[in-house]
Amino acid sequence: MTASRNKIINDPVYGFITIDHPLLLKIISHPYYQRLRRIYQMAFAHLVYPGAVHSRLHHSLGAYHLMCEAIAVLKNKGVRITAEEELATKIAILLHDIGHGPYSHALEHVLVENVRHEQISISIMQLLNEEFGGKLDMALEIFRNIYSKKFLYQLISGQLDVDRMDYLNRDSFFTGVSEGVIGYDRIIKMLTVHEGKLMVEEKAIYSIEKFLVARRLMYWQVYLHKTVVSAEKMLIKIIERAKFLLASGKEVRASSPILDFYLRYKTNSSEPYLEKFYLLDDYDVMSSVKNWIFDDDPVLSILCESLINRRLLKSHLQANPYDEMRVKELKQEVAERLNISEEDAAYLVFTGETSNTTYDPSDERIHILFKDGHVKDISEVDNALIHQALARPVKKFYICHYNEPGEG
Amino acid sequence: MTASRNKIINDPVYGFITIDHPLLLKIISHPYYQRLRRIYQMAFAHLVYPGAVHSRLHHSLGAYHLMCEAIAVLKNKGVRITAEEELATKIAILLHDIGHGPYSHALEHVLVENVRHEQISISIMQLLNEEFGGKLDMALEIFRNIYSKKFLYQLISGQLDVDRMDYLNRDSFFTGVSEGVIGYDRIIKMLTVHEGKLMVEEKAIYSIEKFLVARRLMYWQVYLHKTVVSAEKMLIKIIERAKFLLASGKEVRASSPILDFYLRYKTNSSEPYLEKFYLLDDYDVMSSVKNWIFDDDPVLSILCESLINRRLLKSHLQANPYDEMRVKELKQEVAERLNISEEDAAYLVFTGETSNTTYDPSDERIHILFKDGHVKDISEVDNALIHQALARPVKKFYICHYNEPGEG
Amino acid sequence: MTASRNKIINDPVYGFITIDHPLLLKIISHPYYQRLRRIYQMAFAHLVYPGAVHSRLHHSLGAYHLMCEAIAVLKNKGVRITAEEELATKIAILLHDIGHGPYSHALEHVLVENVRHEQISISIMQLLNEEFGGKLDMALEIFRNIYSKKFLYQLISGQLDVDRMDYLNRDSFFTGVSEGVIGYDRIIKMLTVHEGKLMVEEKAIYSIEKFLVARRLMYWQVYLHKTVVSAEKMLIKIIERAKFLLASGKEVRASSPILDFYLRYKTNSSEPYLEKFYLLDDYDVMSSVKNWIFDDDPVLSILCESLINRRLLKSHLQANPYDEMRVKELKQEVAERLNISEEDAAYLVFTGETSNTTYDPSDERIHILFKDGHVKDISEVDNALIHQALARPVKKFYICHYNEPGEG
Amino acid sequence: MTASRNKIINDPVYGFITIDHPLLLKIISHPYYQRLRRIYQMAFAHLVYPGAVHSRLHHSLGAYHLMCEAIAVLKNKGVRITAEEELATKIAILLHDIGHGPYSHALEHVLVENVRHEQISISIMQLLNEEFGGKLDMALEIFRNIYSKKFLYQLISGQLDVDRMDYLNRDSFFTGVSEGVIGYDRIIKMLTVHEGKLMVEEKAIYSIEKFLVARRLMYWQVYLHKTVVSAEKMLIKIIERAKFLLASGKEVRASSPILDFYLRYKTNSSEPYLEKFYLLDDYDVMSSVKNWIFDDDPVLSILCESLINRRLLKSHLQANPYDEMRVKELKQEVAERLNISEEDAAYLVFTGETSNTTYDPSDERIHILFKDGHVKDISEVDNALIHQALARPVKKFYICHYNEPGEG
């Protein structure tokens, strides 16, 4: 009898995802990985796109699936990838976001200050590596880009990595923004390795053009949608306010001891903070926000009630900075209306900037391998759409401000 | 200038959902409705199907969308539906699940004992009606099936209502179980009203056959999947255990005052309990479960840790009841291993039954209108697939029991 | 430099089809294979479902794609399939329909009497084998089911072969009949080989149930749709009439010498007829039909004009045979109205029967491999839906008859 | 009893298309319209994308469907469209391509010289109008852009018309080139009328950006794919050769009298040629091509055999014109190898140019209506992607030349 040794997982985006190694199954079953179920991939995008409630676990599985496809394509083209390297690369992509905290990017640098999620990912991977007796050594080397075959790292993190391909695709799918759909399967089939570097064959140019445009569209239509920006900035203000109140000596309790720990944590503390990180997820944050609706600090209470009931701060994006005088006026109005200080009003009226660099040539390059064997960076290709229009970062300025309910 | 007066919402299932009346917009914006964002439509199905994380709000919007289509089809066929009735029916479907609590069906009757969610829905609709100055009167009449045009109620609750059509379709979509896809658009286009009753035209027979089969498949493959059953029953045991401990005088705190209220609530209390219900959602429950991992009651702690880390009780479904002696033995083993009483072990080893009646003729009938004007119930149609096989309820017995971690 | 050695073909159904061996490419490029572009997969189904215009070439490529997936799954489960066997099986599926003539099943046995298309397929494969120096030897053995590993043949022709899976899937896709969609990817992932036979794992039962129901639905809703039946029977009558006129000594010219040859061919002739078969396609037939609109034989002219302009004979399907007296009356009416003989009217008024056996247990069986290692035929599985309802053939009787234009 | 008075047609692209007026049904049933079934929407694109075999009839139905949606959106926004105008606009879009001949654009100006298909469409619409007793009067006025409400014409023919939206969408769908998918539903929902002109609301900017990019991609990846270009130019050469031979006094017979008529037709003839046009379709052309494989003119025979067996002339596209000397050399080589004159070799070695202007501002403009009521042409919007990169026409030069079979 020949039974299936693999586990298959239904995925509305790709049909089925096959987990084809026992170590991968063990990693997925680990509480550190299961925690990712409780973190929204897109934070508050679901306030505008109600379908966008998929989890970071789901994205990780999707990126893993694309990695399986990419590796199969490369091996089929004669690129040498050993079984050990293959497994290590799959582990690395499965765990690439293991360090994300509640509400992903929205709260990065806010709960745990000055630490990027990639750094936390490495820490957690090291904990897992100890637990698994060093079986994650090579995965860690690849993830930290110190492994000899650099193209394996490029598959995980680069301009055309499977992480981006999955999130663009998956986010399009769950938001229902069909314009964000990318031809990921075509791009993957066109991947190749030349002189040790990951590149794409010439035939993929239009697909990449489309990929860059789709990414741009997703930024403006989804990721930086003014309502989404407002909700995410409000959550930051909520956490900042709670920390501020605590620092001022007021007793503010989170709904869980673990979030209490992080709210009270001092960056100069010697206490290890990563060890508890794997306990933290969206539930700690959102159930605290729900409780704080009844806090007696009016600023905290207003922010929490507004966020929970989706009565968000009014927001606006524009090309130029907002007039400081006008912002100050708004703060004063709000301070007066709510009978709070101007400093406190700054939690309810604030500005900032946000940007999208679709393709940053200083970052990582997309190399095109032409049929005759020469290589060009995509920015050098004779394609006005790509090198003229897309390469420039686009910065926008936002304002969020409190409005009397019913003011519209 | 002609601007859009409607709001459109992206939906991956139907493309766009159009909200075409200001009152509908106000209802959707209300905190009672927004609460549905924080309730999983499919409770723990996402533990097997990671995409199944859509919210009850999303389902309500989807059912509303199908209602818009159904009404347009009927009006186009000459069925008289006034503008007021149309709006009322749309309100009724938007709010049909407003009474669902955390984890939907999983916790029904557990947190609030002996009250069906439909009853709570009516209570909340009445609260809203007061707030909206009686504008929901007709919606309430339709929802309570006391309005004269019975077919409007049948669109909301019947064998072929838009509720079922949306949830089958949406649940298939988000789980990725493509076999559950139903030809909802064809069925809707075939809806008609004859002698005051909702029915379908003859041409829809194969689509309905398929609809019933898809529903059956979704039951066995998804809704009653043994892993999903295990997780949902575990959550019930957790709540029961917490209540039991509280009743025994032990101090068990939920993560939120609102959940504390319901855990402590006594059914013979005179205190109104529905008024706070609109505050309750998945976050209260799941963050409490997370905290209780650290409770000193071993039963509560084990159940919570197992659920959070997806190390679920082993479960099994079969056609016959489980041997009581074997169940007793299992309880004793667990009691011994964990050094707890046999009564306590009953939270970790338990049995029950679960059933699926795809088409229950005693319930509501599916009427088929033939071209020559006569009407048949679908069970009378000469279709072996439907009347022989599908009409019978299928009951299965489940067992869930604790296993030492690593026992597999 | 590592360039792609494979050819990839865009397919709206599966995304991409990869042709991964030079011999496969050569076969696809051969005129015998290219001819399949010019044969509708679904004959006249496009008269009801305008999207159903895909070619037999497209279906063959799709079945090949599923074969690639099935072989990968089986190999991954440890089933021994050598590289030579793999290539041979892929060749066999690519060529499984190479013997189909114009309008596929509709004209089978009509143009070339008493020869099944499988027989012609073998003949053409033998011609190709000579041309390719014997490289198709093993493919021929597999296709003729004389190769030792019988499961390879079962993948090509059996109750769960990739042929059926592709055509159900592809036909659903192109007709837009979403209810016909099958969970082919799940079934393929559940395929296994046990004691030399192809079977499916237990977990696939609901998918197979759904597969059988979808097939049934496609039969009644699409393949045996009364309008489709009418058009196909009319084409048969056209060819029969042309042959009859020729046999009566009348000069009837097809639009091409090749079709002339087949119309005039006598079954007792010693002239080889298969050698020219690869020249024949839908274009020969349909352009002849167009020309015959202007033929002076009223029967031929009426049939051709009706078919071309989609003013088809009225048709009806029912459970019982049609009353012979009524049919005779109809013929007499038509004979009188058109001033033709009753014999001639038989081309414009005729009856017949058509049937669908979804799962014929006498044919090939679907074996289910249970986890504990025992095997059951699906008809023995405790599944009322399958063994009670689906196993019985369903026969229907049709009538097609001429109506005065405008009679409706 | 309320029965359906509409006809619904399954469409894989949009689900269902509803025909909601008896006059529309009559037009669709007319032989002139049914002829469009026998014309490929994408001529020879299926030689590269095997799914691209949809018919011009299918596209017309699809454009009609989008027109229904567009009109519903506009009416809902308060734009005044009478029932008569609505019906007329739907008729106009149904018939907008009625004048297309065999192989659509590929043979335009070749079979019927110096007449654009729009002109033939008008002629055929006039014939139909006579037959339908003037009921198409307003449809004709709209189609000829002499009706007062110009926006109705813009819906049929403009930068954002439903014709383009359908063909981009449908062609993407059937080719499987997912990158060509456009967010047509979003664009349609954003349509509005301002000062009598069709425009889109501001929110649609990113969707239009995407639309223009998708169109560009479809041009280069599909419509102007070198293999497709080669096949289409070959067909032109075949028709030109047949005409040339006829003009030289050689007897060349088409497979049908109707094609014979057009091949022999002299532009200075007084004989009406449009009256027979409705008989002509792909079958006349392709069955003639098949027959001409056996013609004794080597040029005609080679071209026909190559096209039928997909052994196409080698083709290449580049940014600059081809060196005339090199082209002359190639012709001489071919002339020598095939033992034909250099003039004859010009049918087998030829160059030309082809171009794509995604958005031509001199043509029709896309107007954007901003929230504050002002209007901008999209080329004035601050969007580098659109006005810098897309506005410029891109011209490419092609060469097609005969290669010895097997030369590769």
Image: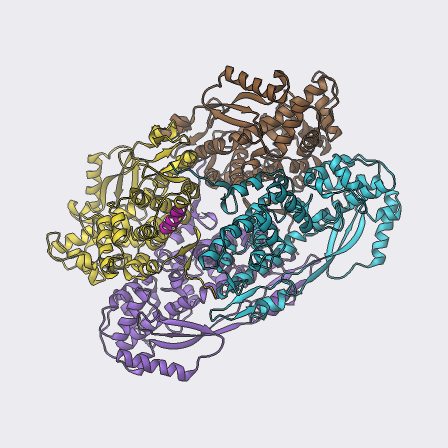
Chain colours: A yellow, B purple, C cyan, D brown
Rendered image quadrant of residue B60: bottom left
Viewed as shown, does residue D240 lie left or right of D250?
Answer: left
Position in image of residue B395 (x %, y %)? 50, 73
Depth check, front residue: A137 or B100: A137
Q: Can the viewer see residue B203?
A: yes
Depth check, front residue: C194 or B183: C194
Position in image of residue A250 (x %, y %)? 13, 57
Viewed as shown, does residue D109 lie left or right of B220?
Answer: right
Depth check, front residue: C385 or C288: C288
The furthest residue to the bottom? B325
Viewed as shown, does residue A104 lie left or right of D336?
Answer: left
The quadrant in which the C terminus of chain A is found is top left
Q: Is residue A160 magenta?
A: no
**Residue B31 position (above or below residue A176):** below
Viewed as shown, does residue D233 lie left or right of A169?
Answer: right
Q: Which residues are magenta?
A: A62-72
Rendered image quadrant of residue B104: bottom left
Which SS does the magenta portion mostly show?
helix
Position in image of residue A223 (x %, y %)? 33, 43
Position in image of residue C327 (x %, y %)? 83, 54
Q: Is residue A65 magenta?
A: yes
Depth check, front residue: A124 or D20: A124
Q: Can the viewer see residue B210?
A: no
> Could you tell me how many numbered marks the image carries?
0
**Residue A286 position (above or below residue D62):** below
Residue at horizontal 20 percent and vertical 63 percent from the top: A257
**Residue B350 position (above or below residue D203):** below
The furthest residue to the front? C133
**Residue A309 position (above or below residue B213):** above
